[in-house]
Every structure is written in C-alpha cells, then in structure tokens.
Amino acid sequence: MSDKVQPNPSEAPTHDAQLAAEQIASGEKKVPKVNFEADYAAAQQFSVSEIDRTGEGKIAAEAVTAPKYEIPDQEETKTETQSTGNPDDYVEMADKIGASRIEAVTSVSDDLVQQALQKGEAAKE
C-alpha cells in the first residue's frame, strides 16, 4: 500500500521539516513514497534484539536487575503507647526519633546510610 504525502509547511514540527515541505510544495523535491507494510516489516526485525531471542537475554537481564544488598524479610512490630498527658513525654519521644524542636526535617547523607548498612550487617553475625 502506497500513500501520497501532501506536506503542509505551516504544520511542520521543525524548521527542517518546514523547509522540506516548502521544497516539495514548490516542486524542487519529489514527494517521498510511503510504504507502511514494508516499514512495518522492517520495524519487526528490530523490535527484538538477537540476545533476547536466546536464553542468554533473560540471564543477562536478571543479572543486571539483581539487588546489590540482601533484603531482609519484613518483621511486624507492635508498639503500645501509654497516654500520660505530660507534654514533656512527647518532647522526649521526638528527641529519641531524631527530630528537633526547631527543625522539622532531618537530613540523611550517604555516609549515614552506609553506617546503617554496616551496623545491620554486623548484627547478623
């Protein structure tokens, strides 16, 4: 199936496309012939790489996407709070979890994450 292309310079998305459309409209260039079936067939050849046609593609994908660290199983923890009505208890609790009265957001650096990972690995031993 072959369709004739009639370019409209005012609808061209880029400057190069606009120039090409103007040259086609003025007759300087020939109108390109479009064959959708041939283009589609060619695209199908490129849709899957050679490695993906074999079992090696799956192995390579799993190796690349494998996690770097061992992920521990989740453990459910239950925390029971005792309401005392004393505001000082809330301040103490906030200090324990790392918050401050002045600053609502705490920063986490890469060094802090590395230390946490090392402490987690040391606890497993």
Image (spheres, rainbow, N blue to C red):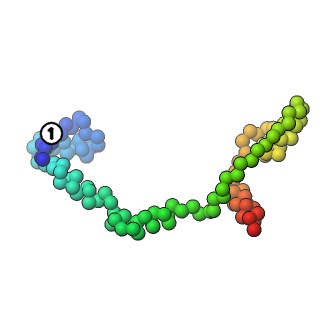
Q: Residue 46: x and y, percent?
A: 29, 59
Q: Is residue 12 above or below residue 71?
A: above
The amino acid sitting under disc 1 is Gln
Please state if 68 lies on the left or on the right of 64 as rendered.
right
Secondary structure category for the residue under label 1? loop
State the residue position of label 1. 6
Residue located at (66% from left, 58% from top)? 72
Please state if 64 lies on the left or on the right of 97 as rendered.
left
Q: Is residue 41 above or below residue 98?
A: below
The answer to whether one can see residue 48 in this image is: yes
Q: Residue 82: x and y, percent?
A: 85, 36
Q: Residue 52: x and y, percent?
A: 36, 64
The answer to whether one can see residue 111 in this image is: no
Residue located at (40% from left, 66% from top)? 57
Viewer-side residue, 6 vs 48: 48
Number of other residues with Cα within 10 Å of mark 1, as a class: few under 14, some 14 to 19, many 20 or more? few
Viewer-side residue, 18 vs 41: 41
Residue located at (70% from left, 60% from top)? 117
